[in-house]
Amino acid sequence: MLELLAARLAPTPTVVLSAYANEAVANVLGLDGIPFLDKLAGLATLLATLDQEVELTRLVTARGLVGVFARVEKRLLRTMLDALRATSGNQSRAALRLGIPRTTLRDQMEVYGLRSADFGRPKS
C-alpha cells in the first residue's frame, strides 16, 4: 500500500509502527527508507521521528519531486542528515562517513539550503 501511495501521491510524511519493529522485518516488508518504530518506542521517539519525516518531506517537496523519485531522494537525504548529525556538521568527516567527496556533500547541502552550523559546528 505504501509503495502505491508513494507512486501516485505527493510525498507524505510516513512512519510505520509495529509490535515487531526490527531491521529484518522492515526489509521483508520493503520499508526501505521509511522509519519503522516499535509501538513501545515512546512518545518522545515518535514525535522526533515525525518531526524529521515532516522536514524531509518539506525539503523533497520544495524540489518538486514526486513518486518514486521523492522516495529515493528522501532516503538519500535522511542518510546525509544522519551523517551530518553524527559528525556535528563536520563536512569532511560526514563525507568520509558517506563515502563521497566533500564537494559533493557541500553541493547537496546547498541544494537543500543546509549549513554546517545547523548541526552544531561552524562550516569546515
Image (tube, grey):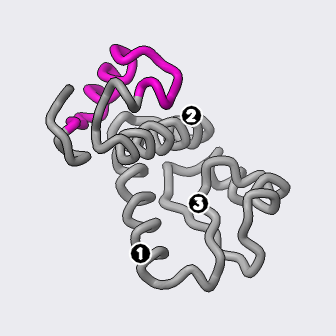
Dot 2 or dot 1: first in sequence order is 1
Q: Depth-wise, is mark 2 or mark 1 nearer the camera?
A: 1
Task: Report, in whole angstroms, how far the alpha carbon at label 1 lies from the one at label 3.
Answer: 12 Å
Q: In the image shown, does 84 or 60 lie closer to the viewer?
A: 84
Residue 112: x, y in percent?
30, 34
Q: Are marks 2 and 1 in contact (CB under 8 Å)?
A: no
Q: Identity of the amino acid at label 2?
A: Phe
Q: For the point 23% across and 34% down, which residue is it?
A: 113
Per the image, label 2 sits on a secondary structure element best described as helix
Which span of residues is magenta-colored? 95-116
Crowding near pointer 2: few (<14 within 10 Å), some, many (20+)? some
Q: For the point 40% across and 69% down, which residue is it?
A: 48
What number is the disc on residue 27?
A: none
Residue 45: x, y in percent?
47, 74
Please identify the dominant SS of the magenta region. Answer: helix
Dot 1 or dot 3: first in sequence order is 3
13 lies left or right of 23: left
What number is the disc on residue 35?
A: 3
Residue at image mark 2:
69
Per the image, label 1 sits on a secondary structure element best described as helix
